[in-house]
Image (cartoon, rainbow, N blue to C red):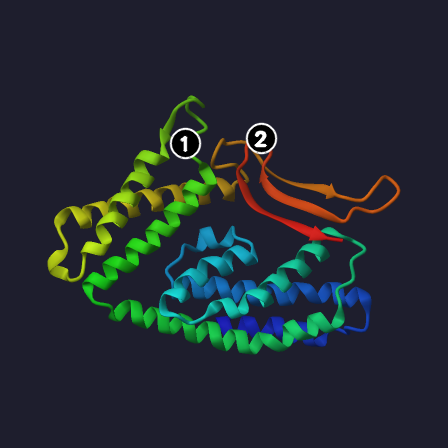
Amino acid sequence: MDLNERLDRNLAIFDKLDLDDPYERRVAVKPLIDFYQLLILEVGVTSCHLLRDTMNNYSLNSRWNAVKHYLELIEKNPSEWDQTISSIQKIRGRNEHNDDYIPNSQTLRDVREKAPQFREYLLSAGEEYLSQSLGLSTIDQYKRLTHEYSFRSDSIRGQYGATIPKSTEEDPSAEFEIDEHLVILRDEILVRLPQLNSIHDLEGDDLNQLIALAREVERIEARESVYLRFGRCPKCGKNIIESRQQIGGSPEEPPDAVYYRLGCGICDFVVFDEIIEI
């Protein structure tokens, strides 16, 4: 079954459900989420060259933010869809973590109504990005890759901080500095970038530094993907767990919201988190 058939199947399942029935409204959230998550995943992998294993670990919002970064490079105004994606994410969170939550039928209909337009937009924007990226000059390709790996290195640095264990099988104190491998390379490349206006400005060191940055980013992302696949924290090696914490309210009243977190049970590594309003 190809992508469009899978997408159509999700919408067909949604359309068969009776949104006047509260229980079926809860069930209806699943095919809608699957439609948007699958579409963003495939465009991210096929058009933006994002890693499938990494994208599979992302929430809907995280997948969208990853793809949006590339579409912004060709000025396709992806931010106009931010509210729709955020709305779907909130519905999913409340539906998943509150057994008494009943989605609003009109909200579900609105999200369903926007699905064909979003599919048309995202597939078209993805194809345009892929086409432009293939037709770029050598210096523009270099600059695009530089921005891409700088963005990914910033994400790694934000998640891990300054250090990351080499392996859970080794001495836990055995760490290497991410600063040395990523931040210094990233900073040197970005400082050099404004000086590069044509292919003749490129020097051997420019290419070597970009290759070194790309290798380091890919290595850490691949390592992270393997750890998460086995439910282990790529930062400290302990188990990835789900947790929920009530926010607000009182002993006699329900909470105002719930903080949901999927991440390491020991350190601060987070796969996904959100605040679910009750």
Residue located 67% across and 55% down the image? 93
Kindly state the secondary structure of the residue where label 2 is placed.
loop
Q: Quadrant of residue 96?
A: bottom right
Relative to 105, is 166 on the left or the right? left
Relative to 14, is 205 on the left or the right? left
Q: How many callouts does the rendering have? A: 2
Q: Residues within 10 Å of mark 1 (few under 14, many from 20)?
A: some
Relative to 13, is 164 on the left or the right? left
In the image, is residue 270 above or below residue 61? above
Relative to 221, is 189 on the left or the right? left
* Image position, residue 249 (x, y; %): 80, 44
In the image, is residue 174 above or below residue 219? above
Mark 1 or 2, nearer chain start? 1
* Image position, residue 243 (x, y; %): 67, 40
* Image position, residue 160 (x, y; %): 45, 37
* CB under 8 Å between discs 1 and 2: no
Which residue occupies the foreground of this view, 208 or 20? Answer: 208
Residue located 25% across and 44% down the image? 188
Residue receiving disc 1: 163
Residue 266: which disc?
2
In the image, what residue type sits under mark 2?
A: Ile
Residue located 55% across and 42% down the image? 270
In the image, is residue 109 above or below residue 164? below
Q: Residues within 10 Å of mark 2 (few under 14, many from 20)?
A: some
In the image, is residue 126 above or below residue 231? below
Residue located 27% across and 49% down the image? 190
* Image position, residue 234 (x, y; %): 47, 37
Give me the C-alpha separation between circle 1 and circle 2: 16 Å
In the image, what residue type sits under mark 1?
A: Thr
Instruction: Give the number of the mark in front: 1 or 2.
Output: 1
